[in-house]
Image (tube, rainbow, N blue to C red):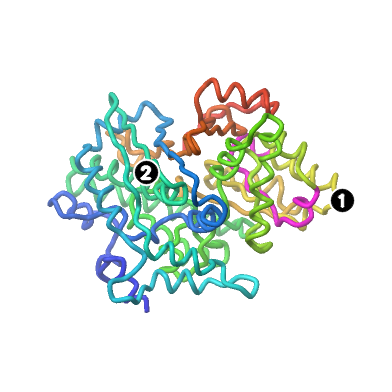
């Protein structure tokens, strides 16, 4: 079955298992056509779980997503040629979850996902996915950056997010490596592999730290993510809980991990009619989610309009009926203490709940957080960019061999501007006037200011 799946994805067995370094880069330098994304399953799993909710309740709503490079010191458009980026974005638009033979392993895997005694995805949504193709995009160069937008039906354009980011990220590092000799490439990857291995050895000495791979969107490359996951599964099989990447999950025989993201509350709040309705709409996402999914997927986000304000008005059923929360911005220690205090105020033992830390993590932050909260509340970690793209210092001659904060965010919904405030001022998105308006609505004057490196 696995071999069949490789064929569906357009990946030969020898390519899937090849070493993710010099042989692969050599192919790029010889001008071969090697798309960074070759399957619509090579996507964060939450795009499917959110997609089903959007399909059910908002399939007639339009949206625009836009690329945001938070690190302006990275001249993206000067490094990645526009024609090359267009070529691989266009290729992604040819991908399908269906099969010309009528037998689709992708769809069979998605259809076969069962939780709490029922299929996770309903048939009408599956039929939508069978016919789905990524919609059009708009790309233009503005100075040394790209303006990339996706506009159209929300349920369709939403699927571009992590796919577009993965394409851009891999093309960026490919271009950097084109100027390196064979021996420099050998050293680059040897150093990066050594860094990964040392991190895994440290985590092996901290068995209470359990984590999932959240690194698809800013990975060094598809093959590098696969190598890192394979190494991790071999060294830490009990601590690695899964991966957010759907393709990697099925390839490595792991459960895909994903619930919901900021775009849902951003959209629902923007669509509200008054300031009062906007404030209340931040809780509409968990209400709709609870109707659709079982308790295992009930992990809520608190930071879209600040965690402090979320907890101030959060309904009691969130404390009792939901499994936990994901911390994605701001000071993780402050947010975790806030969550524990809120649970206790509703008579809930924090040890029965879970907090997933997922903001710019690496080994040392995970160790510190576990040392503080282990035994006080259930903990898990979403390890992202510094898991799948830590080449910092591996080639000191070029300072661009480092991860940078590239995101694709909801810009507007049915023509209405969308805003994310975040617990970190520097992660806020939206135009300035709307951000100022939202700050008043959500009493968000005391946010943290932390540089979003990754």
Report how many numbered discs are placed on residues in the image. Answer: 2
What residue appears at the point 19 percent right and 40 percent down from the top-left corner? 83
Which residue was labeled with disc 1?
Answer: 347
What residue appears at the point 71 percent right and 38 percent down from the top-left corner? 280
Give the vertical position of 331 relative to 324 (above or below). Answer: above
Which residue was labeled with disc 2?
Answer: 391
Residue 452 position, x and y percent, is 50, 33
Q: Please rate how many residues cluster around mark 2, counting C-alpha atoms within 10 Å: few if below 14, some from 14 to 19, many from 20.
A: many
Quarter of the view holding residue 211: bottom right
Q: Please rate how many residues cluster around mark 1, counting C-alpha atoms within 10 Å: few if below 14, some from 14 to 19, many from 20.
A: few
Residue 59 position, x and y percent, is 50, 52
User: Which region of the structure is painted magenta?
Assistant: 316-333
- Extreme residue in the bottom direction: 1
Q: Nearer the viewer, mark 1 or mark 2?
A: 1
Who is closer to the viewer here, 96 or 59? 59
Q: Is residue 286 highlighted in magenta?
A: no
What residue appears at the point 42 percent right and 62 percent down from the top-left corner? 129
């Amino acid at each position: 079955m696995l071999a069949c799946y490789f064929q569906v994805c357009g990946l030969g067995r020898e390519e899937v298992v090849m070493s993710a370094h010099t042989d692969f880069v050599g192919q790029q330098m010889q001008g071969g056509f090697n798309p960074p994304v070759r399957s619509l399953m090579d996507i964060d799993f939450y795009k499917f779980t959110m997609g089903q909710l959007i399909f059910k309740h908002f399939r007639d709503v339009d949206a625009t997503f836009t690329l945001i490079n938070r690190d302006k010191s990275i001249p993206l458009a000067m490094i990645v040629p526009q024609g090359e980026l267009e070529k691989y974005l266009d290729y992604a638009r040819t991908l399908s979850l269906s099969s010309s033979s009528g037998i689709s392993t992708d769809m069979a895997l998605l259809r076969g996902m069962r939780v709490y005694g029922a299929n996770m995805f309903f048939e009408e949504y599956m039929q939508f996915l069978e016919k789905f193709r990524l919609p059009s995009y708009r790309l233009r160069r503005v100075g040394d950056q790209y303006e990339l937008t996706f506009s159209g039906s929300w349920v369709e354009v939403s699927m571009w997010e992590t796919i577009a980011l993965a394409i851009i990220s891999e093309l960026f590092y490919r271009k950097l490596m084109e100027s390196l000799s064979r021996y420099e490439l050998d050293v680059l990857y040897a150093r990066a592999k050594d860094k990964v291995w040392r991190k895994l050895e440290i985590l092996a000495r901290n068995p209470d730290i359990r984590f999932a791979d959240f690194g698809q969107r800013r990975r060094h490359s598809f093959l590098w993510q696969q190598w890192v996951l394979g190494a991790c599964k071999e060294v830490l099989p009990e601590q690695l809980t899964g991966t957010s990447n759907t393709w990697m999950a099925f390839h490595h025989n792991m459960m895909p991990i994903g619930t919901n993201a900021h775009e849902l509350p951003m959209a629902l709040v923007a669509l509200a009619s008054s300031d009062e309705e906007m404030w209340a709409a931040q809780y509409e996402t968990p209400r709709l989610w609870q109707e659709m999914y079982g308790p295992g997927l009930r992990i809520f986000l608190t930071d879209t309009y600040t965690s402090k304000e979320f907890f101030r008005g959060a309904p009691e059923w969130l404390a009792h009926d939901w499994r936990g929360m994901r911390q994605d911005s701001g000071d993780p220690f402050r947010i975790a203490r806030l969550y524990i205090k809120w649970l206790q105020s509703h008579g809930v033992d924090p040890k029965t709940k879970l907090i997933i830390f997922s903001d710019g993590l690496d080994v040392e932050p995970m160790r510190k957080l576990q040392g503080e909260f282990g035994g006080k509340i259930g903990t898990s970690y979403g390890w992202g960019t510094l898991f799948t793209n830590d080449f910092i210092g591996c080639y000191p001659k070029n300072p661009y061999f480092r991860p940078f904060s590239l995101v694709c965010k909801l810009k507007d919904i049915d023509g209405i501007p969308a805003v994310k405030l975040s617990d970190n001022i520097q992660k806020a998105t939206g135009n300035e006037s709307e951000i100022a308006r939202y700050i008043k609505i959500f009493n968000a004057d005391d946010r943290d200011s932390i540089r979003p490196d990754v």
